[in-house]
Amino acid sequence: MLFLVFLSVGASQIKEFTKNFFPDTLKILSALHLKIMKNLLSSIWKRVYSYSFILTVLVTLSLFLTGKIVYNFQKNDREKHESILLLTKTADSAVFQGFIPPKTALPMLEHAYRMGGNSVKPYAGFLSSCFYIHNEPLRGAYYAGLAYSSGAKFHMPSPAQVLLKEIADAQATQDYQAALEKSSQLLQLSASSEDYPTLRFLTLLRIIEIKEILNQDTETDFEELKTLPLFKEFEQFYKDGEWTLTKRFGKKH
């Protein structure tokens, strides 16, 4: 009898426990499930957003780099064209008008020579003459060597290029007697044609400078120099400077 009473009470308590406990458990499980789903959706959204952001950055960067490359190509082409035009006009002015570019323009002409590529290699001899006349023999010898090597590379060697190279080598080793002999040969070559007025003028000027180093008389050479059309242009260009050809070489005569 006591056992049945105990069992009845126990069953009643179990029923009450189940009635009170399970609803809370279901609520907890539902809340937990909802939280898990929210976290999962949030994680998925963050990943999708992160991938989209990275993809957008990469696409933007690729477009920027592509534009930069295209701009650099166009800029290089434009600079190359302008360099060729600059050297061509300057050399034509020197040959046909007797205009000698000032010393301050030499860095710009050098830059144009580097940018111009193969198209401006024939102007190495012109640059060599410009540096020699502005008393920069090392740079002059450098471009004289380029003029000779580029002529050999393109199978267009000329006696003038060969003599320019030999003169530059002789001056570099201070063999001024050999440089004077080669310069005299180059003067004869340039004087035999009306196509080289600038080369003739510069060569004669070089002969005067070498003869001064060798303590030889330069009066006859200077008088010949004054008869050339380029002499007047040179004097006019430097008339406001510290020296002219007359002040530099004519004071001893």
Image (cartoon, rainbow, N blue to C red):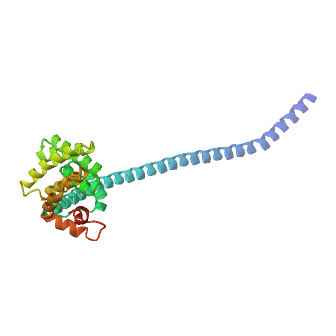
Q: Which of 43 and 191 lies nearest the eye of the viewer?
A: 191
Does residue 224 show up?
yes
Q: Residue at x 17, y 63 (%)?
A: 93
Q: Which of 107 and 195 lies nearest the eye of the viewer?
A: 195
Q: Which of 98 and 206 lies nearest the eye of the viewer?
A: 206
The image quadrant of residue 89 is bottom left
Residue 234 placement (x, y as % from top left): 21, 65
Residue 150 placement (x, y as % from top left): 19, 44
- The total of numbered circles placed on residues is 0
Q: Is residue 117 above or below residue 246?
A: above
Does residue 1 show up?
no
Furthest-right residue in this view:
2
Q: Is residue 151 above or below residue 227?
A: above
Q: Quadrant of the N terminus?
A: top right
Q: Residue at x 32, y 53 (%)?
A: 72
Q: Residue at x 29, y 58 (%)?
A: 108
Q: Quadrant of the C terminus?
A: bottom left
In the drawing, does residue 59 fall left or right of residue 196?
right
Residue 231 placement (x, y as % from top left): 17, 64
In the drawing, does residue 90 fall left or right of residue 43?
left
Residue 69 placement (x, y as % from top left): 34, 51
